[in-house]
Image (tube, rainbow, N blue to C red):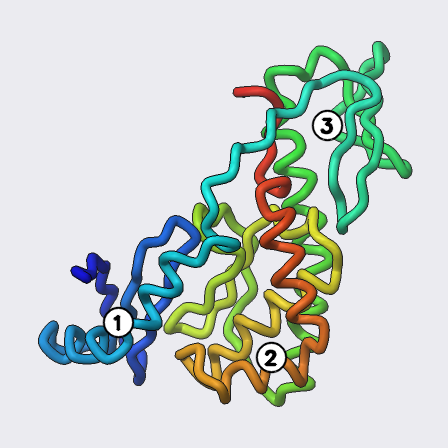
Amino acid sequence: MKLNYQIIYSKRKKLGITVERDRSIVVRAPLGFSEQQIQAVLENKKLWLYEKTHHVQKYADEIHPPGKELVSGESMLYLGRNYRLQVFEAEIESISFKQKFIIHKTNHTQANELFKTWYMAKAKQKISPRVELHAKNLGLRYNAVKIAELKYRWGSCTPNDNLIFNWRLIKAPMFVIDYIIVHELAHLIESNHSQYFWRIVKINAPEYEKAKVWLKEHGQLLEQNFGDL
């Protein structure tokens, strides 16, 4: 099996290998690590990489859910629950949320951006304190927490100890968010997905298996937009 992979060099101390949601292999290597050394490591992990890139449940080519319609009665996810959308005639700035989402009908062409702005604000409000709590429990320090648009990942831990989370995570239940947070924090201790890494995750996010199943079954729903806007 020929392996195609991307190498990202940084000041990190250990070599890290991840398989993204699009099946691509990313190698994060310390500066000065030769490609021959990287190929040797990949060769030793060839079976593991094959299993990861051919995991049916995780990477099944599912039909993408249809886009949302900006009509009253539609529903939107927030923290794992569906809330009704109500489209008003009256002038309303941005998005209003009162146990339902309220938006002005003339905002049709801006709906995706308005909801993204709202979700990102909520993600910053909800995720940052959870990161601080879990980091304290793990006895860890990190540089900063950022909420961003991540194409193929729910979270990321950078060589500078920045923790980046996909804004769409705020649509998922809190036990899923906690799992992703602990997963990224654990990478500050162990860069690879070793048995030691998963022990850290299991102790600090006991529902991690349930969270992984939830993401496999519902992950695509977090990526829904309005129509093809």
Residue 167 in sight from this viewpoint: yes
Could you tell me which secondary element the residue under label 3 belongs to?
loop
Q: Residues within 10 Å of mark 1 (few under 14, many from 20)?
A: some
Instruction: Identify the residue under disc 2.
Output: 201
Amino acid beneath label 1:
Lys
Amino acid beneath label 3:
Ser
Residue 32 in sight from this viewpoint: no
Say whether residue 145 is left or right of residue 71.
Answer: left
Q: Residue at x 50, y 89 (%)?
A: 196
Could you tell me which secondary element the residue under label 2 belongs to?
helix
Instruction: Identify the residue under disc 1.
Output: 46
Instruction: Identify the residue under disc 3.
Output: 94
Q: Residues within 10 Å of mark 2 (few under 14, many from 20)?
A: many
Q: Residue at x 66, y 24 (%)?
A: 68
Badge nearest the viewer, 3 or 1: 1
Question: Mark 2 and mark 3: span between their CA atoms?
Answer: 38 Å
Q: Residues within 10 Å of mark 3 (few under 14, many from 20)?
A: some
Question: Mark 1 and mark 2: span between their CA atoms?
Answer: 24 Å
- Report if the CB atoms under discs 1 and 2 are less than 8 Å apart: no
Q: Is residue 109 above or below residue 191?
A: above
Residue 85 sits in which quadrant?
top right
Q: Residue at x 36, y 58 (%)?
A: 53
Q: Nearer the viewer, residue 164 or 15?
A: 15
Quarter of the image where the C terminus is located: top right
